[in-house]
Image (cartoon, helix red, strand yellow):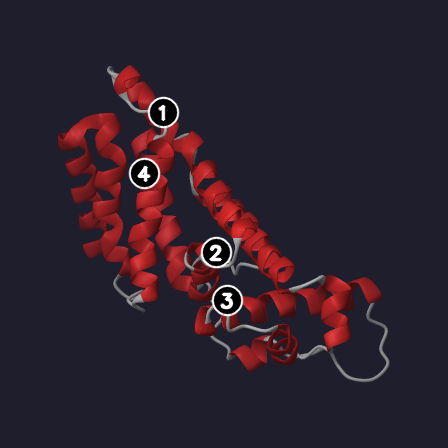
């Protein structure tokens, strides 16, 4: 999986993580070799973009870091943008699988939101390079990448929209509320990422919960959920 399992970030160096297949002739299937090369290039892209930014990351540098030939890069991707978008898409897909595994949809909605935000913050801490690619650099990598970022916000909206059932005045809530909330949450994380302040990211959970829940359950219930999250974090 392109995004490492929740809570299990790889502690090896980038060089070790990008180690090539054994040299010389071997019996490894061609499809496996091709997939291995692709994964190395996507990993290299995430790491380089997080370190240098999208504009300063070149195809030559991606290929060199991934330990593949330039011709191999062009066998997989037409250009740098296509490689970046592939890294974005696979990161989001893998994150979605983790949410599906770890967030119990049978829980009350408020608990689902609390669990989902906690999982999200854990993933950002565990995979900072990929988080930076998706949350920070996607907004500076061209129109297609910005479109991907907007789509990411919109995928969160349906789950947030379920909270309208808890608000007796749901008709007064603006149509674009859910995307606005998702954008606000991403902005909070974005600020920590660009300032390299990820170590204290989990401390954002109570604030993020209160921002998310207040339009649906009111300030008192939102504050109660935020206090419970803070207590769990301190335990």
**Secondary structure at numbered mark 1:** loop
The residue carrying mark 1 is 175
Q: Earlier in the sequence, mark 1 or mark 3?
A: 3
Q: Label 3 crowding class (10 Å Cα cut-off): few <14, some 14-19, many 20+? A: many
Q: Is residue 23 left or right of residue 94?
A: right
Residue at image coords 82%, 70%: 28
Q: Residue furthest left?
A: 220
**Secondary structure at numbered mark 4:** helix
Q: Label 4 crowding class (10 Å Cα cut-off): few <14, some 14-19, many 20+? A: many
Residues marked 2 and 3 touching at CB (< 8 Å)? no
Query: Which mark, residue 138?
Result: 2
Q: Residue furthest front?
A: 143
Label 4, label 2: how many angstroms apart (C-alpha)? 19 Å
Label 4, label 1: how many angstroms apart (C-alpha)? 12 Å
Q: Earlier in the sequence, mark 1 or mark 2?
A: 2
Query: Could you say where residue 197 lies in the image, as x and y percent from the top left?
Result: 28, 67
Q: Earlier in the sequence, mark 4 or mark 1?
A: 1
The residue carrying mark 3 is 54
- Count of numbered circles in the view: 4
The residue carrying mark 4 is 181
């Amino acid at each position: 999986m392109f995004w490492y399992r929740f809570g299990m970030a790889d502690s090896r160096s980038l060089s070790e993580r990008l180690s090539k297949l054994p040299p010389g002739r071997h019996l490894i299937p061609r499809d496996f070799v091709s997939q291995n090369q692709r994964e190395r290039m996507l990993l290299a892209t995430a790491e380089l973009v997080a370190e240098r930014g999208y504009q300063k990351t070149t195809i030559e540098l991606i290929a060199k870091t991934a330990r593949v030939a330039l011709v191999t890069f062009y066998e997989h991707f037409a250009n740098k943008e296509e490689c970046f978008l592939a890294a974005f898409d696979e990161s989001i897909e893998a994150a979605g699988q983790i949410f599906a595994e770890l967030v119990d949809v049978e829980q009350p909605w408020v608990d689902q939101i609390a669990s989902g935000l906690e999982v999200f913050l854990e993933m950002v801490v565990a995979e900072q390079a990929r988080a930076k690619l998706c949350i920070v650099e996607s907004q500076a990598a061209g129109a297609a990448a910005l479109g991907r970022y907007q789509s990411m916000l919109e995928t969160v909206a349906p789950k947030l929209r379920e909270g309208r059932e808890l608000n007796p005045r749901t008709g007064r809530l603006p149509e674009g509320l859910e995307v606005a909330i998702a954008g606000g949450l991403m902005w909070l994380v974005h600020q920590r990422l660009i300032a390299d302040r990820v170590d204290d990211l989990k401390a954002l959970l109570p604030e993020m919960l209160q921002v998310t829940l207040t339009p649906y359950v009111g300030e008192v219930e939102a504050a109660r959920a935020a206090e419970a999250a803070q207590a769990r974090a301190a335990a």
